[in-house]
């Protein structure tokens, strides 16, 4: 059993350094090896399905900065529970992408998989990503117990948010 | 350590943060006006004579919002739209090599500045890569 920091050191997780060095980090974002690969290789090649001026990579950069800096998030617009599929699984959202994962502790997100939002809806991939990919990764990860914050209460997983 | 960074050009980063911040600020103002006097997206749409679905897509970021539309929405919210371009300033107490700190432009419909976070002007464009050490943390300044 290990903490996310120890898993990051061991290569089982990848900690995202989203902020400039003089900025205090208030939330942590860890990625699975698969999510790290996707962020590195796939995200930079994606175009927006909405033909908007900020592409998916820029959307993610903006969201990750807001997230890690502890700035106010908007429930459902930027993070949303998927408890109807799997307990404790949440998605972080931008216009074009969805990142599936869970909160190990309040303000500590561990992402397991991400994909194009349009593709997820078209092929109905929510169940697979939440209940199979994320759940299996969470179960297999040698993370300290309790591994995740259960339930769908946004106050239990994120500080500083509001409703749209 | 396998920690990693995702970098885009500082100009695009500023753009992404600015666009997100403008939308965020309008949503926040709408939330406040909704609590205060029950204002809804439908009311905004009616006030500026566009369909509600257009406003909804713009506020959810699924349609680009023009500068003019941001001002219209600000007006419809009963706020004063403003746009500021503060000069770059050096942050006191920073352990970064000076003069690295800038504040982003701000625009909005309320008093709070969504761009309170500062970023270095010297940031460089680099591809996504693993980062093993944070060089400046160890630098002798």
Image (cartoon, rainbow, N blue to C red):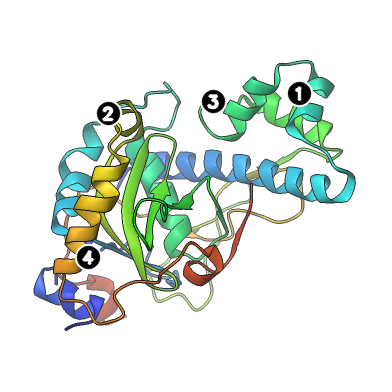
Residue A68 vs residue A10: left or right? right
- Binning the other alpha carbons within 10 Å of mark 1 as few (below 14), some (14 to 19) or many (20 upward) gives some
- Residue carrying label 1: B45
Q: Do the residues labelled 1 and 3 touch (CB within 8 Å)?
A: no
Say which of marks 3 and 4 sits in front: 4
In depth, the one of A136 and A27 nearer the eye is A136
Q: Do the residues labelled 3 and 2 touch (CB within 8 Å)?
A: no
Q: How far apart are marks 4 and 2 (CA)?
A: 23 Å
Separation of marks 3 and 2 at Cα, in angstroms = 26 Å
Spatial CA span between label 4 and label 1? 44 Å
Q: Mark 3 points at which residue?
A: B64
Counting from the top left corner in percent of width and height, residue B101 is at: 47, 61
Q: Kindly report which numbered mark, 4 or 1, lies closer to the viewer in this rendering.
A: 4
**Discs 3 and 2 carry the same chain letter:** no
Looking at marks 1 and 3 on the same chain, the residue that comes earlier in the sequence is marked by 1
Q: Which of marks 1 and 3 is in front?
A: 1
What residue appears at the point 17 percent right and 75 percent down from the top-left corner? Answer: A7
Q: Name the residue under label 4.
A: A138
Q: Name the residue under label 2.
A: A123
Q: Quadrant of the N terminus of chain A?
A: bottom left
Q: In which quarter of the image is residue A53?
A: top left
Label 4 CA crowd tier, 10 Å (few <14, some 14–19, many 20+):
many
Where's residue A16, x and y in %? 28, 62
Mark whose residue sits in front, 1 or 2 = 2
Residue B19 is drawn in which quadrant?
A: top right
**Residue pushed farthest front?**
A84
Q: Distance between the residues labelled 3 and 4?
A: 37 Å
């Amino acid at each position: 059993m290990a903490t996310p920091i120890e898993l990051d050191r061991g290569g089982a997780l990848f900690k995202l350094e989203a902020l400039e060095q003089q900025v205090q980090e208030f939330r942590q974002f860890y990625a699975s090896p698969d999510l790290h690969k996707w962020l590195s290789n796939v995200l930079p090649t994606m175009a927006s399905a909405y033909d908007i001026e900020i592409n998916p990579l820029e959307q993610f950069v903006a969201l990750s900065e807001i997230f890690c800096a502890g700035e106010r998030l908007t429930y459902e617009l930027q993070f949303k529970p998927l408890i109807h599929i799997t307990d404790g699984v949440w998605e972080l959202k931008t216009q074009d992408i969805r990142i599936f994962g869970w909160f190990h502790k309040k303000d500590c997100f561990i992402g397991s998989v991400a994909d194009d939002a349009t593709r997820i809806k078209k092929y109905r991939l929510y169940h697979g990503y939440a209940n199979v990919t994320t759940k299996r990764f969470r179960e297999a990860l040698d993370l300290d117990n309790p591994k995740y914050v259960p339930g769908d209460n946004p106050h239990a997983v994120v500080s500083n948010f509001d409703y749209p | 350590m396998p920690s990693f960074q995702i970098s885009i050009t500082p100009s695009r980063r500023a753009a992404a943060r600015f666009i997100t911040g403008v939308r965020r600020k309008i949503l926040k103002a709408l939330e406040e006006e909704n609590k205060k006097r029950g204002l809804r997206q439908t009311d905004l749409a009616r006030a500026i004579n566009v369909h509600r679905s257009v406003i909804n897509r713009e506020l959810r970021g699924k349609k680009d919002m023009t500068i003019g539309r941001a001002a219209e929405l600000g007006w419809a919210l009963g706020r004063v739209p403003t746009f500021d371009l503060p000069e770059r300033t050096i942050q006191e107490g920073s352990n970064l090599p000076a003069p690295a700190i800038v504040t982003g432009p701000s625009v909005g419909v309320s008093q709070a500045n969504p761009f309170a976070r500062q970023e270095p002007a010297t940031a460089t464009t680099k591809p996504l890569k693993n980062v093993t050490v944070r060089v400046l943390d160890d630098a002798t300044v």
